[in-house]
Image: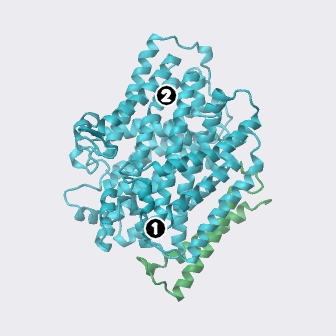
Amino acid sequence: MISYPPLALAAVPPSRLLSLSFIDVLIIVIYFVVVLAIGFYLKKYTSTGEDFFMAGRKMTAWIAGLSFISANLSSLETMGWSAMSYQYGMLGAHAYLIGAIPAILFLAVVMMPFYYICRTHSVPGYLKLRYGEPSRALAGISFTFMTVLVCGVNMFAMAKVMQIILGWNIHFSIWVSSVTVAIYVALGGLLSAVFNEVLQFFLIWLGSLLIPVLGIIEAGGWRNMMASINAQHPGQNFTSLWANLGSAADNPMGMHWTGMVFGLGLAISFGYWCTDFLQVQRVMAARNLRAAQNGTIIGAALKMMVPLIVTIPGLLGLAVLTQKSGITLVPESVAQATGGHSYNEVLPLMMARYLGPGLLGLGVTSMIAGFMSGMAGNVSAFATVWTYDVYRPLLNKTAGDSHYVSMGRWCSIFGVFIAIATAYAAMLFSNILVYLQVLVMFFIVPLFGTVVLGMLWKRATPAAGFWGFLSGILSSITMFIYVHTLPGSFDASALNPEHVRYIALSPLAKDMAVNMFGGLWSLLVCVLVTVAVSLFTRPKPDSELANLVYGLTPLPREGPSVWYENPKIWAAVVAVVLVAVNIIFW
Amino acid sequence: MDKEFRIPIWFFIGALLGIYGLLILCSGLYGLVHPPERQVALSYLHADIWWGVLLLVIGIVYVRKFRPNR
């Protein structure tokens, strides 16, 4: 999918899996009308910076939680992880279990009080308060850079899906969806993004859920589906969560369990869920601390259910597609050379298999909604960080609130145009999700090390925060270059097994495994440098760390509440369910 | 949050799901009389009809419960 240059992509003749009926087109058109209508409706409610960038800090726990998880349900989720499940089997579900839930619960119970009480507008804003301006500038600039790149990948993925399924012109898809997002985010800011994300959550689920339901019926039930996968892939274990992780040679990902636990489960997961401002912004905008914590936990519970609409379609592809349709999916480069179907097409192919007129329109709308929620999340986070953490402190410190709101509206539009340019350039990696993983590893994972040390260790100094974060970023980039350096050349789409063995502890490791271990090492580098520099530099006095650091932050009393509003109880329930799911599918 | 807006987000969701349910249900019923050329897998289950009914019911419930100025 991403192995050829943009112009070659444009020259690919449209191949079409499906034709939409009139009713399908009508369903898609109605969706665009409604999201734009919401944007125009909400414009009158966003007159101040607090309204535009933080949705007025009035969201209920349910709205915050639905928005939190919907912003993450982008094209990279639905298409990318379905493709991962086809490639790696049940291992793909780890992204929703150990790769998400512990981190989300940690965000809710441990980190959210600091974010909320210090009343910052963003994660880089917290760094400013805790470490000072240099750390904030580094985080703000790297975050805005990453955000527009991810947004560009989103756009490209959506346009590619529309081309594969419907034969739509790839440029038409990019421009229509991105301009729509730009309009409604520019009009209503985070408020508009959140409203639409809640709407998109329902559409994504109701448009996607029929595929696993019908697929499992066709496969003859869950046990028969697993038996069919095992029968069609003798000698390969696609159906276990943990049983095949004892050795890198035992699973299709080339992954050892330590990489899954510490790489995905600790470094990448905690980096993404606890410090990626796209996610954190949604729950920081809740109306009080309890709503922010409960909204985050609602998001965790919903996240655990996403494998139903993402992992199962990938597994169904393994069980059903070859057996009943004679289709075997291949890597993108092979698909391009042979005219076959690639891993990334598994979800559209399953959609084509089960959804007739009307339902197909809903299914396509659910994918568009997923793409647009991801884009809107990136755009609204970009607007906030650019305005509050780059523009205001570095370029214009003295403007009034209305000026910053205006800046937020314009940079929403500007950010979309940068992302459009990125979409045409984001075609270097063998799988679209690997692209996101690389970006997360570069910036977000070290950021987590810096933030969590700042919250939990008052001895961490301003200089240590900056140098720890910077060294984490540089080590990530160095490792990326190292594993892709071949004898005599550099190829971002190929791995050098001789170098991979030192990063991922096995020459068999694939892209995902390399990224997980790379994330772990960059986190360790960040933490070690931060601790070392702290021991030789002067810390801030306690008086400057109030409401920022554990032990110096009294939690506000929010009045009595009934037991079912206690975040710790629900966090424990979600944790127990997580353990049970892992045991059941071991 | 919803109390501050004249039209709550849940109303938008209900209205959209209701319209979608009605369209999909009508499409499914039409398909009973005039089966489409391209038959999908398990078409005999008529998923479009019962899924359309489900969306319609959810939509009606949300629209009634969260209608403006209720």
Q: Nearer the viewer, residue A403 or B29?
A: A403
Output the chain of dot 1: A
Q: Is residue A226 visible?
A: yes
Residue A543: x and y in percent read: 62, 14
Task: Give the residue furthest to the bottom.
Answer: B33
The label nearer to you, 2 versus 1, is 1
Q: Which residue is mark 2?
A: A452
Question: Left or right of A460: which side holds A565?
Answer: right
**In percent of the image, x 40 and y 41: which residue is there?**
A438
Quarter-wise, where is residue A98 in the image?
Answer: top left
Q: Residues within 10 Å of mark 1 (few under 14, many from 20)?
A: many
* Rendering colour mode: by chain
- Residue A159 spot, x, y in % from top left: 50, 59
Colour in which the image shows chain A: cyan
Q: Is residue A346 above or below residue A423?
A: below
Instruction: Specify the amino acid type for callout 2.
Output: Val
Q: Residue at x 49, y 64 (%)?
A: A162
- Provide the letter of the chain coloured green: B
Q: Residue at x 54, y 50 (%)?
A: A420
Q: Secondary structure at mark 1?
A: helix
Q: Position of residue A565 (x, y in %)?
A: 61, 43
